[in-house]
Image (cartoon, grey):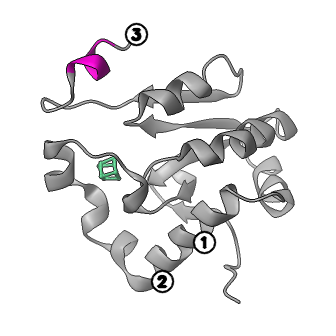
Amino acid sequence: MYSPGNILSTNLKTGHSLNLPRTNCTPTKNCAHCCYGRIGHTCLPDATKKAAYVSEYLSGMDIARLVDECRQLTTVRLSGVGDLLTAHIPNILSLANQCPQTMFWGMTRKLPISYALQGVKNIRLMVSVDSSSPKKTWAYN
Ligand code: SF4
């Protein structure tokens, strides 16, 4: 059965990240057209296979490997590519709780994800918008 060497991915720009499938996204019209995940390394077969694994992993019961990886880091980006699912929320909260010295940061296009992760001291999640985002997203405070 496939298992990547590390759960986290790395790149020079954003450091360490959880890269997720673009199929997890709820893209706006603009976002679907301009998505940075459509081109480059993140859409190669190895990367999409790993992203599918990570999404499944975050929906599972045991995140010990990921906790070990994150504990050694000061920052980890949530959804370097793609977006979180509500099924990931329990493990993201558990991860933040088990890695109090690590700051988890990133973007989401989904208001329920943002609401679910509000108020956690080591999570900073921005709601990302563009000109084609729905009014309720623009109304988010
Ligand atoms: S939310 Fe981000 S990763 Fe998802 S489709 Fe939009 S630009 Fe791409």
Identify residue for label 3: 141
- Residue for point 77% across, 43% down: 95
| Structural distance between the alpha carbons of marks 3 and 2 | 37 Å
For residue 127, above or below residue 86: above
The answer to whether 83 is drawn above or below residue 104 in the figure is: below
At x 41%, y 84%, the residue is: 45
Quarter of the rendering occupied by the N terminus = bottom right
Q: Secondary structure at mark 3?
A: loop
Mark closest to the chain's N terminus, 1 or 3: 1
- Between the residue at mark 1 and the residue at mark 2, the CA separation in whole angstroms equals 11 Å
* Residues drawn in magenta: 135-139
Q: Quadrant of residue 65?
A: bottom right
At which x and y percent is residue 49? 50, 79
Q: Quadrant of residue 55?
A: bottom right
Q: Residue furthest front?
A: 87
Closer to us: mark 1 or mark 2?
A: 1
Q: Which residue is mark 2?
A: 46
> Could you say which disc has been placed on residue 95 in the image?
none
Q: Amino acid at mark 2?
A: Asp
Front position in the image: 110 or 36: 110
Give x and y (percent) for residue 93: 73, 35
Q: Is residue 141 left or right of residue 4?
A: left
**For marks 3 and 2 on the same chain, the one whose residue lies earlier in the sequence:** 2
Q: Quadrant of the C terminus?
A: top left
Query: Which of the 4 quarters of the picture holds residue 105?
Result: top right
Q: Amino acid at mark 3?
A: Asn
From the viewer's perspective, tell me whether residue 1 is left or right of residue 98. left
Q: Please give the residue where the numbered disc 1 appears in the rendered image.
A: 53
Q: Tag count in the figure?
A: 3
At label 1, the amino acid type is Tyr
- Please tell me which of labels 1 and 2 falls first in the chain: 2
Q: Is residue 110 magenta?
A: no
